[in-house]
Image: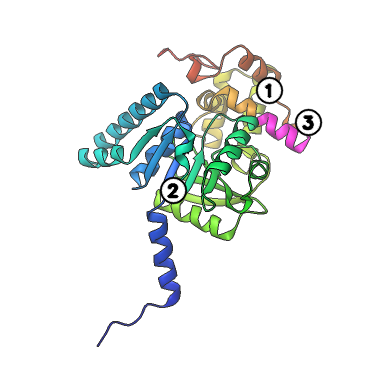
């Protein structure tokens, strides 16, 4: 007897999985989030193009990815040969024009609307019609970015968490125009990356940072108003709320400039004074005290 024909729904599922498996992914921006996303994409078997305007930054990013893979080797997560395969999946590029044949592009440049809008507009003119344009923004309107393009149905948010190779969540942000096909594709890709995708609608700050950043901002108000020391504020939240990091320690880890950017998006987006950024936060950012990446924030970091 011959084999029974596959049900048509199963055929479609298999076809979609094959399509996702063959996706070519570009990541725009090779900073902390960009190199982390490229790492995870390449480790999941995707041919990954990491794009930045600065070749030195790209070389630095690849070095960071290599060191992070070495950590995985030391933890017996991957082997030496698997590391080499992952590195071989990554190509470096300084010319945005070479993204034209990509199936998915994940933008991970600094959290500034004008920069992101400009990139989306340029990518829309370069890429094939079927290319999905995703943003790793942590708070900026996906709808507004989509308005820069002629493909609103292919625009979506993919908000990875830091550090990307470790954190499981991808916040998937859909607009009123994002197609079901685009959503399904991003869900499938997220799962292939061994992540857990969770959907939400496009509102300022989405879910994660609409809840997290006001808490951090309030902790900064507590410090500014001398309610307690920074150590006490963090200890209370760690011991009393079972948070792995206190809010001020977490702000240093995220970057105070990023915290301020997100609070300003919330403040402007909702026009509600409860989201106003704390003056101390603004002063520290203008003074270059950005947290771990600058060597000093609420705490000092002696590796600088």
Label 3 belongs to which residue? 273
Image spot of residue 7 (x, y percent) = 41, 78
Does the magenta-highlighted stretch encompass residue 220?
no
Q: Quadrant of the N terminus?
A: bottom left
Task: Check disc 2 and report the residue beneath it.
Answer: 195
User: Mark 3 near mark 2, Cβ–Cβ under 8 Å?
Assistant: no
Q: How far apart in space, not on screen, are marks 3 and 2 (Cα)?
A: 35 Å
Q: Are marks 2 and 1 in contact (CB under 8 Å)?
A: no
Q: Secondary structure at mark 2?
A: loop
- Residue range in magenta is 263-272
Q: Which residue is mark 1?
A: 221
Q: Nearer the viewer, residue 200 or 18?
A: 18
Quick one: label 2, few (<14), some, or many (20+) residues within 10 Å? many
Q: Position of residue 245 (x, y in %)?
A: 50, 30
The mark that comes first in sequence, 2 or 1, is 2
* Disc nearer the start of the sequence (3/1): 1
Q: Which mark is residue 249?
A: none
Q: Residues within 10 Å of mark 1 (few under 14, many from 20)?
A: some
Which is in the foreground here, disc 3 or disc 2? 2
Residue placed furthest toward the bottom: 1
Name above or below for residue 186 compared with residue 252: below
Q: Nearer the viewer, mark 2 or mark 1?
A: 2
Residue 76 visible in the shown view: no
Quarter of the image where the C terminus is located? top left
């Amino acid at each position: 007897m011959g084999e029974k024909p596959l049900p048509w729904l199963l055929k479609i599922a298999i076809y979609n999985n094959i399509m996702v498996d063959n996706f070519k992914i570009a990541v725009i921006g090779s900073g902390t989030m960009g190199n982390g996303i490229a790492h995870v994409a390449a480790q999941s078997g995707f041919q990954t193009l990491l794009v930045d305007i600065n070749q030195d930054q790209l070389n630095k990013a690849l070095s960071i990815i290599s060191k992070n893979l070495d950590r995985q080797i030391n933890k017996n997560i991957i082997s030496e040969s698997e590391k080499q395969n992952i590195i071989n999946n990554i190509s470096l590029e300084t010319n945005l024009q070479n993204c034209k044949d990509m199936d998915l592009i994940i933008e991970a440049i600094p959290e500034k609307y004008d920069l992101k809008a400009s990139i989306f507009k340029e990518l829309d003119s370069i890429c094939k019609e079927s290319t999905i344009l995703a943003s790793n923004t942590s708070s900026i309107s996906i709808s507004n970015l989509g308005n820069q393009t002629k493909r609103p149905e292919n625009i979506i948010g993919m908000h990875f968490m830091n550090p990307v190779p470790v954190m499981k969540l991808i916040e998937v942000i859909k607009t009123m125009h994002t197609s079901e096909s685009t959503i399904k594709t991003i869900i499938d890709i997220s799962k292939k990356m061994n992540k857990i995708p969770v959907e939400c609608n496009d509102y300022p700050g989405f879910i994660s940072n609409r809840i997290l950043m006001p808490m951090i901002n309030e902790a900064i108000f507590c410090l500014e108003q001398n309610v307690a020391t920074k150590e006490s504020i963090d200890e209370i939240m760690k011991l009393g709320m079972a948070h792995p990091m206190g809010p001020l320690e977490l702000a240093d880890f995220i970057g105070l400039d990023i915290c301020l950017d997100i609070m300003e998006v919330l403040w402007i987006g909702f026009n509600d004074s409860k989201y106003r950024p704390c003056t101390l936060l603004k002063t520290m950012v203008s003074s270059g005290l950005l947290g771990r990446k600058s060597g000093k924030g609420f705490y000092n970091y002696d590796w600088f």
